[in-house]
Structures are given as structure tokens and as C-alpha cells.
Amino acid sequence: MKSFSVTEKDARVKYIRALERFLGSCANALKNESFDLKLFEKRVEKSLKTLRKAEPVRLDSTYTNALHNYVELVLRTLNNEEDDAESKRKVLLKEVNLIEKERNRSSYKKDKHKEQGFNDGY
């Protein structure tokens, strides 16, 4: 296991938290019933300012890499003039759900003794 200095750990935590805040802000806007693309763009700009204050660090886990890739996906999607607002929303919302699924994956436990469980003969 690598040993990081305290400042490296702090920078890492700050960057990951900033990425998670960006994801949370986007997720809330995308899941809102009255989704407005212009308001979403303003929210993204505000979240990007906060994200840029954090110093980028190397990310190792699939979850943190997915967070970083999501920021790039949001920027690419918003710059794409060909798609309409609803298709942009669907793409970004699907990616949010996949990232949240990845984050929650570690909290789900597999049954230890599922072979010994109830067997109804089917």
C-alpha cells in the first residue's frame, strides 16, 4: 500500500468530494420533474467553478474514474448542438444512475449460504 503525505490525502479527498458534489448537483437537476436545460447549464457552470478550485489528482477506483468521466460527458453533451434537451437529459440521467449503481455496489452483500436456503423444488 502506498503512503501518501497528509497534503496529498487532503487534495485527493477534496477533489473526490468536489466530483461527488458535481454529480449530486447534476443528478438533482436531471431528476427534477420540471427539467430546464438553461437552468441545468447554469447549475453546471456553478458546479464547475467549485470543481476547478480543487486540484486534480490521480484517480484509481472505477467509481472515481466514472465521476471524472461524467464531468467530461456533461461538457461534451452540453456542447453538442445536434441533440434536443430531452435526449441530453436521458443520456446524462442514465450515466448518473450507472455511477450511483457503481457507488452502491460495494454496500450490497452476497448471501453466504444461498445453497442452504429454501428450495421449493423448481
Image (spheres, rainbow, N blue to C red):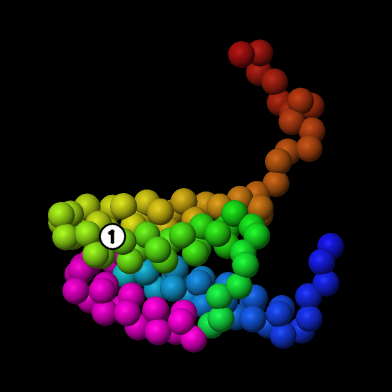
Q: Position of residue 43 (x, y in %)?
A: 31, 78
From the viewer's perspective, is residue 37 above or below residue 105?
A: below
Which of the 4 image quarters holds residue 81?
bottom left
Residue type for callout 1: Thr
Q: Position of residue 103 (x, y in %)?
A: 57, 57
Of residues 107 and 121, which is closer to you in this image?
107
Of residues 52 and 31, which is closer to you in this image?
52
- Counting labels gives 1
In this picture, residue 83 sits left or right of residue 52: left
Which of the 4 image quarters holds residue 97?
bottom left
Q: Position of residue 9 (x, y in %)?
A: 71, 78
Residue where numbered disc 1 is placed: 77
Residue 31 shows up from this direction: no
Q: Quadrant of the N terminus?
A: bottom right
* Span highlighted in magenta in the image: 30-53
Q: Determine whether the residue tagged by mark 1 lies in a helix, strand or loop.
A: helix
Main SS class of the magenta portion in the image: helix
Q: Quadrant of the C terminus?
A: top right
Residue 2 shows up from this direction: yes
Is 42 covered by the magenta stretch? Answer: yes
From the viewer's perspective, is residue 91 above or below residue 49?
A: above
In this picture, residue 78 sits left or right of residue 7: left
